[in-house]
Image (cartoon, rainbow, N blue to C red):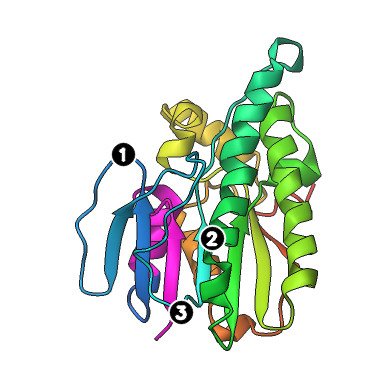
Amino acid sequence: MKNILIVGGSSGIGKASVELLSKNNKVWATYNSHPIESTENSSFHPLNVMDETIDVSFLPEQIDGIVYCPGAINLKPFARIKAADFMADYELQVLGAIKIIQAVLPKMKNSASASIVLFSTVAVQAGFNFHSIVSASKGAIEGLTRALSAELAPKIRVNCIAPSITDTALAANLLNTAEKIEANAQRHPLKKIGKAEDIANAVAFLISEQSAWMTGQIVKIDGGMSVIK
């Protein structure tokens, strides 16, 4: 049974990952503002990744996996974006991940085989209108994934999942009518919207020993959008 930290485990992909991984692992999950009751194999702890100092004293001495889920989807025309908008998004999506990994790294080094899972987006490689904020941050995450996978090998693997739009609270404004759901579904070769469980299954694979020969990879879980035209 592995010890897994899931940052942002109170909703969406993070919550689905907690539910799936806690079946066979011990999960420590964090929330920012909405407390969640602990279960037999999962416990929830308050943590704000925007804090200057990250307190991980609630974790055991050995951590075998980190899943970093906090994110944002800020879609704006480029001409209307302020530098502060880019910086706020970068602080949440990139610096937050960096601070968590740095804080937990000593505990990961106690594991014989550890794994880190980060998140990008299909928009980084595909290129979409109004996605410059999120694409800039997630592009940095893809670069971080490759750099850390080299630096932390061979004991710690680092991989990244790049989803397309997924039916979670984070994407609620894009999927809040039947018409929007259908329009977004039709943009994908598989003609449907991804579910949080679809991504959680990939998380579970990348955390497990089934992916023991994978590191530095950007795994596209996007209904075929990135490769099929």
User: Magenta segment range?
Assistant: 1-20
Gap between marks 1 and 2, in whole Å? 21 Å
Query: Where, quadrant-wise, is the N terminus in this rendering?
Result: bottom left
Which residue sits at x=51%, y=29%? 174
Q: Is residue 73 left or right of residue 134?
A: left
Q: Using a 10 Å C-alpha cutoff, classify the residue at mark 1 as few (fewer than 14 neighbours), some (14 to 19) or many (20 or more).
A: few
The type of residue carrying mark 1 is: Ser
Q: Residue 33 bears which disc, if any?
A: 1
**Residue 133 sits in quarter:** top right
For disc 3, the marked residue is 62
Q: Is residue 163 magenta?
A: no
- Residue 52 in percent (x, y) is at 52, 41
Gap between marks 1 and 3, in whole Å? 26 Å
Q: Using a 10 Å C-alpha cutoff, classify the residue at mark 3 as few (fewer than 14 neighbours), some (14 to 19) or many (20 or more).
A: some
Q: Is residue 202 left or right of residue 13?
A: right
Q: Nearer the viewer, residue 168 or 181?
A: 168
Q: Nearer the viewer, mark 1 or mark 2?
A: 2
